[in-house]
Amino acid sequence: MSQLLKQTFIKDYLKRLQYSGPVLPNLETLNTLHRLHILNIPFENLNNLLQEEYLCTKEGLYEKIVLEHRGGLCHELNTSFAFLLKDIGFSLIRVEAKVYCNYMKSWAPLPTHQLLIVYLGEEIWIVDVGFGEGFAVPLRFVEDEIQDAENANYRIKKDLDEAGQKWFIIESSSRNVVALHLSNEAEKSEDCEWQYIYKFNLTPRSIQHFSNARNMTLKSPSSTFNQGLVCTLLRPWGRITISRYKLIKKYVKNKEISRKEVKMLENQEEVMSVLESEFGIKIQHFETPLKLA
């Protein structure tokens, strides 16, 4: 991209995030942008339901997320955020992760999730704006230390697989973290205080490395994200989610759900109305009827 378009990308992206502060590659900026990203840009699978192809390039993501006021899944959101952070001057790599499936009590067979590792001086930070109900601010890469990420407490533990490969597990102590990635219904662990989220390694990966996982997520009939609509945003008071025809509002106090409201949306027209009013997403029509919950 030209220097002019690079500056346009930064300016328009920061406007999309409703950020007007200093644009410096430091921890304060990283924390603020991370929080604003998951407050303003939804985790959603509308591309799957609209049967739309997309380009996971800087230009393609700029058009979709910034200009069209859309969101996306992990590959889109974290790739797009990585472009912004690099343009601002942050040093980072992309890495892959295996998501933990609560209802099967096992790890996903393949590492299909993408997240970012950001380097600030001698410190390493884990950045992920593409995990549905993930951490609100970056996590410092340090083992066995409880970290307050505003919406939940997290910790990182080292793990070795059967082949001797080193992985790092992210766990949450909040029982409010929903595993949107691998179950049609929101699943949560009730039998232990700490819940697995996913495990990652530190091998740098290119954007192209994730193309197979991206295509599987978009095109495979067995993909969770082809089973029904998911759209979710963090809110100052908690979280708002559309899950198929359910509108779910969870009000959180002290990292625990204090109140939960569930409303059944009657038809596709009401779904589209809520997408626009609550998420700022305008959809004209769906190619196929939405699946009922």
Image: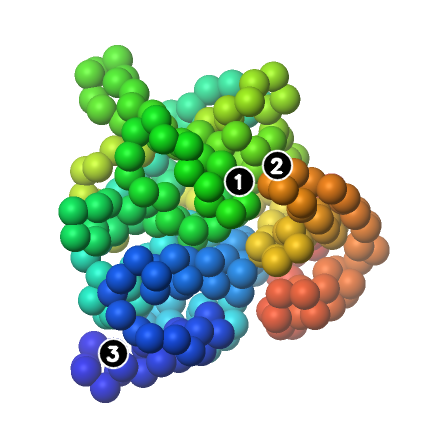
Mark toward the start of the polypeptide (1 vs 2)? 1
Q: Quadrant of the C terminus?
A: top right
Decide if residue 77 is in sight here.
no
Q: Is residue 233 left or right of residue 141?
A: right
Which one is nearer the viewer's eye here, 80 or 168? 168
Residue nearest the viewer, comparing 183 with 7: 7
Q: Position of residue 113 (x, y in %)?
A: 38, 41
Q: In the image, residue 190 lies at what x, y percent?
A: 63, 22
- Disc 3 is placed on an element classified as helix
Q: Which residue is mark 1?
A: 152
Judged from the image, the secondary structure of the residue bearing numbered disc 2 is: loop
Q: Amino acid at mark 2?
A: Asn
Q: Quadrant of residue 78?
A: bottom left
Residue 6, disc: 3
Please state, as top left, top right, bottom left or bottom right, where the N terminus lies in the image: bottom left
- Mark toward the viewer: 1 or 2: 1
Q: Marks 3 and 2, how far apart in space?
A: 38 Å
Give the labeled residue for mark 2.
176
Mark 2 Cα within 10 Å, few/some/many (few <14, many 20+)?
Answer: many
Name above or below for residue 187 compared with residue 207.
Answer: above
The residue shown at (29%, 23%) is 158
288 relative to 243, above or below = below
How far apart, in angstroms, are the residues tagged by discs 1 and 2? 8 Å
How far apart, in angstroms, are the residues tagged by discs 3 and 1? 35 Å
Query: Of the residues under marks 3 and 2, which one precedes in the sequence?
Result: 3
Q: Of the residues under marks 3 and 1, which one precedes in the sequence?
A: 3
Seen as rendered, the residue at the extreme top is: 162
259 with respect to 91 (left or right): right
In this view, the mark in front (3 or 2): 2
